[in-house]
């Protein structure tokens, strides 16, 4: 059987080196959809090309869904790689050190492998379905915070103004009830931090499959819970994600229902 994990790790680390080498250098920045809030850099595109090259060499018949549109394949295959070549582009463009590479593998509609690599901290988060989640080889476990007033939460805001406004109400309610709230600017990192117990809960709207495919599996395999805002089973194609250590999950659902 092909070693999907080894290929995904190699692709993530190769792209991560490219990103780390380009960090704090000169590079081109463009804007998506005519906005000034949704950035893409030439480094995103180079990272995506490097990942696709590795995946395509190993698995020429697999499908690939990548954020920047590379290798938009119509191949008929049960295997689909879901790639975010640089999650946290705005951070990267400003020199803020919070960004990563995210690669997930979906087989017949189920995510079975997730790899997230933070190239600056050289942290490799990974999970395979049924095999647990790991950080640089060590087993990951979610936190034991049992109440919102003991919980450190994290969220993000959409690129468009309507999406940003829609989360402000949730943010204000959680700010009054949680021990603290953070924003890293990278949903994949947020999910991995839930999995590692650094964060107790995460919610966000208007994300895409490449933002959450790998990270959601890593949370689940670390013993956490991932749903939509109402507690329904999570799909990477949903526009709402709620992830937690499981213990504060219902309390977070209750707060989100008030918004």
Image (cartoon, helix red, strand yellow):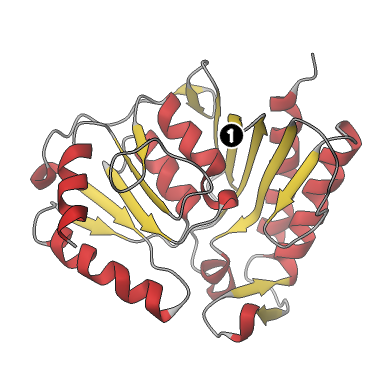
Graded by Cα atoms within 10 Å as few (under 14), some (14 to 19) or many (20 or more), the crowding at tag 1 reads many
Q: Position of residue 105 (x, y in %)?
A: 66, 34
- Say whether residue 94 is visible: yes
Q: Residue 182, image x and y in percent?
A: 29, 59
Q: Position of residue 131 (x, y in %)?
A: 52, 16
Instruction: Give left or right: position of 169 versus 109.
Output: left
**What residue is disc 1 on?**
114
Dot 1 falls on a residue whose secondary structure is strand
- Which quadrant does the N terminus fall into? top right
Could one spot residue 123 in this view of the protein? no
Residue shown at the point (87%, 40%) measured from the top left: 56
Left/right of residue 234 with respect to residue 26 in the rendered view: left
Instruction: Report the number of numbered marks.
Output: 1
Residue 226 location, x and y as percent? Answer: 37, 37
29 over 257 or under it: above or below: below
The C terminus lies in quadrant: bottom left
Quadrant in the picture for residue 89: bottom right
| Rendering quarter of residue 127 | top right
Q: Quick check: 153 left or right of 3?
A: left
Height in image: 92 above or below 250?
below
The residue lying at 76 percent from left, 20 percent from top is 3
Asked whether 91 or 37 is in front, the reply is 37
What residue lies at 55% left-to-right and 85% top-to-bottom? 36
Q: Residue at x 51, y 68 (%)?
A: 91
């Amino acid at each position: 059987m092909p070693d999907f994990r080894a290929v995904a790790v190699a692709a993530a680390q190769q792209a991560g080196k490219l990103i780390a080498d380009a960090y704090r250098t000169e590079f081109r920045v463009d804007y998506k959809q005519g906005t000034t809030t949704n950035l893409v850099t030439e480094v995103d595109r180079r990272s995506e090309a490097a990942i696709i090259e590795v995946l395509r060499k190993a698995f020429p018949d697999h499908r690939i869904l990548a954020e920047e549109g590379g290798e938009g394949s119509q191949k008929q295959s049960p295997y689909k790689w879901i790639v975010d070549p640089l999650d946290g582009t705005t951070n990267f463009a400003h020199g803020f050190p919070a960004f990563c590479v995210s690669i997930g593998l979906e087989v017949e509609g189920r995510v079975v492998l997730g790899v997230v690599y933070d190239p600056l901290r050289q942290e490799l988060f990974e999970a395979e379905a049924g095999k647990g989640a790991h950080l640089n080889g060590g087993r990951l476990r979610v936190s034991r915070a049992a109440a919102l007033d003991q919980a450190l939460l994290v969220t993000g805001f959409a690129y468009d103004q309507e999406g940003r406004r829609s989360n402000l109400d949730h943010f204000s309610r959680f700010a009054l009830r949680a021990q603290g709230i953070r924003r890293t600017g990278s949903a994949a990192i947020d999910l991995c931090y839930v999995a590692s117990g650094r964060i107790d809960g995460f919610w966000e709207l208007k994300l895409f499959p490449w933002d959450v495919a790998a990270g959601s599996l890593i949370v689940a395999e670390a013993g956490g819970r991932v749903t939509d805002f109402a507690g329904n089973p999570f799909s990477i194609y949903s526009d709402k994600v709620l992830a937690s250590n499981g213990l504060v999950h219902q309390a977070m659902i209750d707060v989100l229902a008030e918004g």
